[in-house]
Amino acid sequence: MNKFEHKNIIKSENEKKKRETFFRKLIKPVSAGANGTLNYVVKKGSGKNKVASKRQ
């Protein structure tokens, strides 16, 4: 591996980390009970007809 390849690998890893942190900042937590999210019943998937619980 030469210096050029090494610099490109490091640069791509840094860009990937920046992108991941940016998307994490965009995700906002949902508070239980706000806007009808309390006792929400799952309509599709493996947990169908089950009440969604707060994950900790």
Image (cartoon, rainbow, N blue to C red):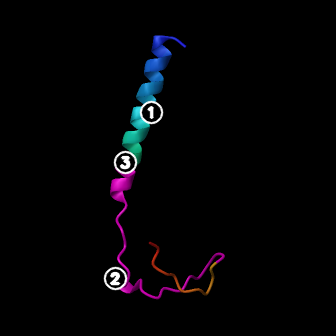
Kindly indicate the quadrant of the structure image that contains residue 56. Answer: bottom left
Q: Residue at x 41, y 27 (%)?
A: 11
Residue 46 position within the rendered picture, expressed as x and y whole percent measured from the top left: 66, 76
Q: Residue at x 48, y 85 (%)?
A: 40
Kindly indicate the quadrant of the structure image that contains residue 50. Answer: bottom right
Q: Which residue is mark 1?
A: 13
Q: Is residue 43 above or below residue 12?
A: below
Q: Residue at x 45, y 30 (%)?
A: 12
Q: Which residue is mark 3?
A: 21
Label 3 Cα crowd, 10 Å radius (few <14 / some 14-19 / many 20+): few
Give the residue type that dot 2 points to: Ala
**Quadrant in which the N terminus appears:** top right
Give the residue type that dot 3 points to: Thr
Tell me the distance, in whole angstroms, between the alpha carbons under discs 1 and 2: 38 Å
Labelled disc at residue 53: none
- Overall secondary structure of the magenta stretch? loop
Q: Residue furthest top?
A: 2
Give the residue type that dot 1 points to: Glu
